[in-house]
Image (cartoon, rainbow, N blue to C red):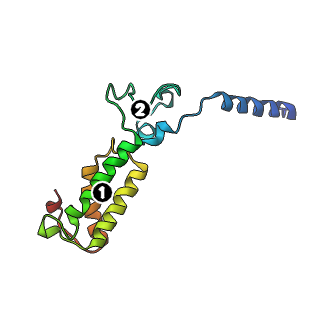
Amino acid sequence: KNSPRPPSSVSTNNNKQKKRQKQEPLVAVQHFAAGYHSRHLSNKNALAPLNSDPWHTSPQRGSHPLLSPSEEELLIQFYAGKLPNLVGPKAQLNQLRREVKVVATAGLFFRRFYLSNSVMVHHPKSMMVACAFLACKVEDAMCHVRYLE
């Protein structure tokens, strides 16, 4: 028969778990700032140690440097600035000239997408086109997808 453990052994186990949690290193916020590590490293132990610089390189990427959050923000700003030329009132193609609210909706979708995703995983140019198409649908200003290609 299984006899219940005395309360002192239960508290000892809780103390051991707390000690283990304190001993395990906390993952730096920088590892997740670019949105890359959290989605593409299946093995949590494969993260670089805390004392190394996560922006220079990782074994999975080879010698290609990672982008810093400020560099990612510059790319997002650049492509968000291109949206009015794609589907706004000043669009380069007459078939894609839409109201300003379509551009605003596309910009909102574009920026919200990159709040939780990285430009290193999803190319901003393709996401810009997808957000423009979705914004046209949402605002009932349909445009054919062949003009967005």
Left or right, residue 9 beside residue 55 = right
Q: Quadrant of residue 23?
A: top right
**Towards the viewer: 131 or 99:** 99
Q: Quadrant of residue 104?
A: bottom left
Residue 98 vs 145, above or below: the answer is below
Q: Tell me where residue 139 appears, x and y as whole percent.
A: 30, 73
Q: Tell me where residue 123 appears, x and y as whole percent.
A: 28, 46
Q: Residue at x 12, y 69 (%)?
A: 94
The residue at which mark 1 appears reads as: 80
**Towards the viewer: 50 or 36:** 50
How packed mark 1 is, by other alpha carbons closer than 10 Å (few <14, some 14-19, many 20 or more), is many
Q: Tell me where residue 51 appears, x and y as whole percent.
A: 52, 25
Q: Amino acid at mark 1?
A: Ala
Left or right, residue 71 beside residue 145 = right
Is there a contact, CB below 8 Å, between mark 1 and mark 2? Answer: no
Q: Residue at x 26, y 62 (%)?
A: 132
Real-space Cα separation, disc 1 to disc 2, in angstroms: 24 Å
Q: Which mark is on residue 99?
A: none
Of the image marks 1 and 2, the number of the one nearer the N terminus = 2
Q: Quadrant of residue 82?
A: bottom left
The residue at which mark 2 appears reads as: 55
Q: Residue at x 27, y 75 (%)?
A: 140
How packed mark 2 is, by other alpha carbons closer than 10 Å (few <14, some 14-19, many 20 or more), is some
Q: Tell me where residue 30 appears, x and y as whole percent.
A: 48, 37
Image quarter in which the C terminus is found: bottom left
Element on which disc 2 rests = loop
Q: Quick check: can you spot residue 6?
A: no
Q: Amino acid at mark 2?
A: Trp
Q: Quick check: can you spot residue 46?
A: yes
Q: Residue at x 41, y 43 (%)?
A: 69
Image quarter in which the N terminus is found: top right
